[in-house]
Image (cartoon, helix red, strand yellow):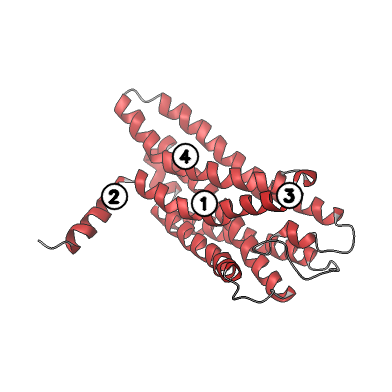
């Protein structure tokens, strides 16, 4: 669990660094319009890391499933090699999809270079095109299904099996402890996949710039900010470590 948490934290740190510094400089008027090359670079890293986060959350769901449903075999199933393979797989899928998506978007001819958004997201950039973007929108929808709906479905299947296993536990204390180990992850999953689904499955006709930007702020800024808070508040080991660290700093 802590291995996957560290990978998710590292991924989300870089994810926010790709977007927030540029966003803040734009808000205070210090940045110039971003070039197409710069926009393509930002979009590439954004897509890679966003998809990486989706599949890392899926891997964490599988980890929770094995821990609760097959506890005696946990150390055998979730060995170091398997964990590394899951992380490598998440990164590889992100890279491959990002290359496909960015290549498709930036082959379009653009009428203007001004993106009506605080970062180079897929839909706002496609709106700059001088030609019909139906093919690109279909590609974006297919990719969204593959990297959002499928991982989300796998996570929820894992939790259905987890719930059935927990309900079989005889003691109330045992059931409570089992649910507690999953609460943080399921909270983050609902926030992450929920915002991503709203952003990329919302009908085009219903899109407004202000709504798009509000949704984007939620899944690019607020969600990564909430994740460590959620895991810290729900994790006794992290709470104890913070208490020990604070105690050492306080004068005796």
- Between label 3 and label 2, give the one nearer the viewer: 3
Please tell me the numbered disc located at residue 248: none
Q: Which residue is mark 2?
A: 239
Please tell me whether residue 219 is drawn above or below residue 171 in the rendered image: below
**Mark toward the viewer: 4 or 1:** 1
Q: Which residue is mark 3?
A: 208
Q: Under tag 3, what secondary structure?
A: loop
Describe the element under mark 1 as helix, strand or loop: helix
Counting from the top left corner in percent of width and height, residue 116 is at 72, 62
N-terminal-most mark, 4 or 2: 4
Q: Are marks 3 and 1 in contact (CB under 8 Å)?
A: no
How packed mark 2 is, by other alpha carbons closer than 10 Å (few <14, some 14-19, many 20 or more), is some
Which is more toward the observer, 222 or 248?
222
Mark 4 Cα-neighbour bin, 10 Å: few <14, some 14–19, many ≥20: many
Residue nearer the viewer, 209 or 127: 209
Q: How many marks?
A: 4
| Residue that protrudes farthest toward the right in the picture | 131
Q: Earlier in the sequence, mark 4 or mark 1?
A: 4
x, y percentage for residue 25? 57, 71
How far across and down, in percent of the image, does residue 153 sit?
A: 61, 39
Q: CA distance from mark 3 to mark 1?
A: 21 Å
Density class for disc 3 (Cα within 10 Å; few <14, some 14-19, many ≥20) is few
Query: Do the residues under discs 4 and 3 have CB atoms within 8 angstroms?
Result: no
Q: Element type at marker 4?
A: helix
Distance between the Cα atoms at labels 4 and 1? 24 Å
Q: Is residue 53 visible?
A: yes
Q: Nearer the viewer, residue 245 or 25?
A: 25
**Residue at 52 percent of width and 31 percent of height:** 160
Residue ID for mark 1:
223
Q: Looking at the picture, how far across and down is residue 178, in whole percent?
A: 37, 34
At mark 2, the secondary structure is: helix
């Amino acid at each position: 669990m802590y291995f996957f948490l560290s990978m998710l934290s590292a991924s989300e740190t870089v994810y926010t660094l790709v977007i927030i510094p540029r966003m803040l400089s734009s808000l205070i008027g210090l940045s110039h319009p971003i070039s197409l090359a710069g926009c393509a670079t930002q979009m590439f890293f954004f897509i890679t890391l966003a998809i990486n986060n989706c599949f890392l959350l899926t891997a964490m769901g599988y980890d929770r499933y094995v821990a609760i449903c097959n506890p005696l075999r946990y150390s055998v199933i979730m060995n170091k090699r398997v964990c590394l393979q899951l992380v490598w797989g998440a990164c590889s899928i992100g890279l491959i999809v990002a290359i496909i998506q960015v290549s498709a978007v930036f082959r379009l001819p653009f009428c203007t270079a001004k993106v009506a958004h605080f970062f180079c997201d897929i839909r706002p950039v496609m709106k700059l095109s001088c030609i019909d973007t139906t093919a690109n929108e279909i590609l974006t929808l297919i990719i969204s299904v593959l990297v959002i709906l499928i991982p989300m479905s796998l996570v929820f299947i894992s939790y259905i099996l987890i719930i059935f296993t927990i309900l079989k536990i005889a003691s109330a204390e045992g059931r409570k402890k089992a649910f507690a180990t999953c609460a943080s992850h399921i909270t983050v999953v609902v926030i992450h996949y929920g915002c991503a689904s709203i952003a990329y499955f919302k009908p085009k006709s219903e899109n407004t710039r202000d709504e798009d930007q509000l949704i984007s702020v939620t899944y690019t800024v607020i969600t990564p900010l909430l994740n460590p808070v959620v895991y810290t508040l729900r994790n006794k080991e992290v709470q104890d470590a913070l208490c020990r660290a604070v105690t050492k700093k306080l004068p005796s």
